[in-house]
Amino acid sequence: MKFAAKEKILADSQRTLEEIYDMLHSAKSISLQELQSEKTALIMVDLINGFTREGALQSARVESILKEVVKLQQASIDKGFEILAFADSHNAVSPEFESYPPHCLMGTSEAEVVTELQQTGGYQLIRKNSTNGFLEEEFQKWLSEKQIIDTFVIVGDCTDICIQQFAVTLKCWFNKENQKVRVLVPIDLVETYDLGSHNGDLVQLMALYNMTINGVEVIRNISLDNQE
């Protein structure tokens, strides 16, 4: 395979990025009141110490969304939504450490949900040993028991890794089953990290776009106004 000339790739990419940015910038917002209590689940992904406050993969960008996530978490409790929290939890020989620095070892504080979410509560915790929480047997069991749910709101990190993999896999699984569901990702409640060539702004933009073209509803935010 041959690449096009560098100048052409960069010029075309600039135009494409502008189009994607404008599309996402104009994404719609929805109201919490649009979502049916018994049919909606809030999925909080990897809002743990190891991605927010300590360790090799901590990110101030991720930490910055915690306050607003907690507001949605509390509103979801008040509405009676099902709530799950995924938490990265690896053993020392995890093959994932060939791709990422060692992080979130089982039994350490890095693998624990941040204090704010713990204090708010109301969620079922599912520990995961890969970037894709969909693959965990405990989630598969939960999904089989919650067949009434047709709307999934996904928040957390990292947008281009765990969020994207989970959201797209979830949507694809329901497509396979010929079931229409809504998989919602609010732009203001997902984040990633900056590290070397991993430009957070760029990968955030491209991950949101990739989810969009795979049937995930990428929205600007979820308004909590006029809660009942």
Image (cartoon, rainbow, N blue to C red):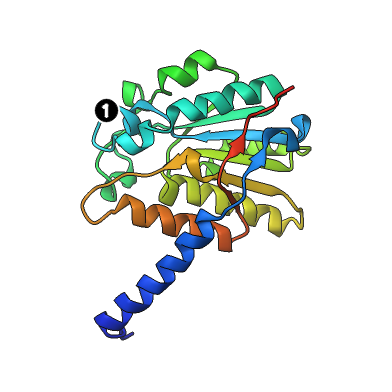
Query: Height in image: 192 above or below 6?
Result: above
Image point 49% across, 61% down: which residue? 22
Q: Is residue 200 left or right of residue 190?
A: left
- Name of the residue lying farthest toward the top: 119
Question: x, y percentage for residue 169?
Answer: 57, 53
Image point 33% across, 85% down: which residue? 1
Question: x, y percentage for residue 170?
Answer: 61, 49
Q: Quadrant of residue 14?
A: bottom left
Q: Quadrant of residue 227?
A: top right
Image point 49% across, 51% down: which residue? 164
Query: What amino acid type is highlighted by mark number 1?
Result: Glu
Q: Is residue 197 left or right of residue 72?
A: left
Circle 1 packing at 10 Å, graded few (<14), some (14-19), many (20+), is some
Image point 55% across, 17% down: which residue? 121
Question: x, y percentage for residue 124?
Answer: 58, 24
Q: Nearer the viewer, residue 104 or 220?
A: 220
Asked if residue 108 can be seen in this view, the reply is no
Q: Nearer the viewer, residue 23 or 217?
A: 23
Q: Secondary structure at mark 1?
A: loop
Query: Height in image: 225 above or below 192?
Result: above
Q: Which residue is mark 1?
A: 54
